[in-house]
Image (spheres, grey):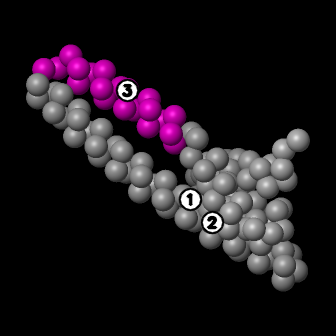
Amino acid sequence: MADDSTMNALIGGVVTIVLSFTGFSPVLGGAVAGYLNQRDGVRVGILAGLVALVPMVLGVFFLGGFIGLFSMFGGRGAMMAGGMGLIVVLLVFVFASAVIVGLSALGGYIGEYLYTEDVL
């Protein structure tokens, strides 16, 4: 049987993905996970952020394969440009991952705070 924290993190991750058109969806998803979990808000917020990264990871693999495939047949210059493109994609991915997981942890803290202070 799955732990409640795991289920709450999945729910928070799905909320983050569904509300991704907003600028603060990781905070909302982490807050939902922290509120539902009622304890360990930061930990479950981090887990929700990691769940929300799944579509981004799949997108990076697709984009990396696309760049690699076309640079492979373009000669030396295209390979160099493709390699630089992959480096840029990976750096953006690392930065975006840190921001998403960090904001989800903040949201988890806020959700736990809202639960313990009986605000909602």
Residue type, mark 3 in image: Gly
Q: Earlier in the sequence, mark 3 or mark 2?
A: 3
Q: Is residue 72 something that shows in the picture?
A: yes
Q: Is residue 17 something that shows in the picture?
A: no
Residue visible at 83% across and 62% down in the picture: 36
Q: Quadrant of the C terminus?
A: bottom right
Q: Which residue is mark 3?
A: 65
Where is residue 119, by image quadrant? bottom right
- Name the element at disc 1: helix
Residue visible at 42% across and 48% down in the picture: 93
Spot occupied by residue 23 in the image (x, y as percentages of width and height): 55, 61
71 or 45: nearer the viewer:
45
Specify the principal SS of the magenta part: helix
How much space separates mark 3 and mark 2, taking CA atoms? 31 Å
Q: Earlier in the sequence, mark 1 or mark 3?
A: 3
Q: Which residue is mark 1?
A: 101
The answer to whether the residues at label 1 and label 2 have Cβ atoms under 8 Å apart is yes
Spot occupied by residue 34 in the image (x, y as percentages of width and height): 76, 65
- Name the element at disc 3: helix
The residue segment tinted magenta is 56-75
Q: Is residue 70 magenta?
A: yes
Q: Which residue is mark 2?
A: 105
For label 3, count other residues whose C-alpha is less than 10 Å away and answer few (under 14), some (14-19) or many (20+). Answer: few
Residue type, mark 1 in image: Val
Q: Quadrant of the N terminus?
A: top right
Spot occupied by residue 9 in the image (x, y as percentages of width and height): 73, 53
For label 2, count other residues whose C-alpha is less than 10 Å away and answer few (under 14), some (14-19) or many (20+). Answer: many
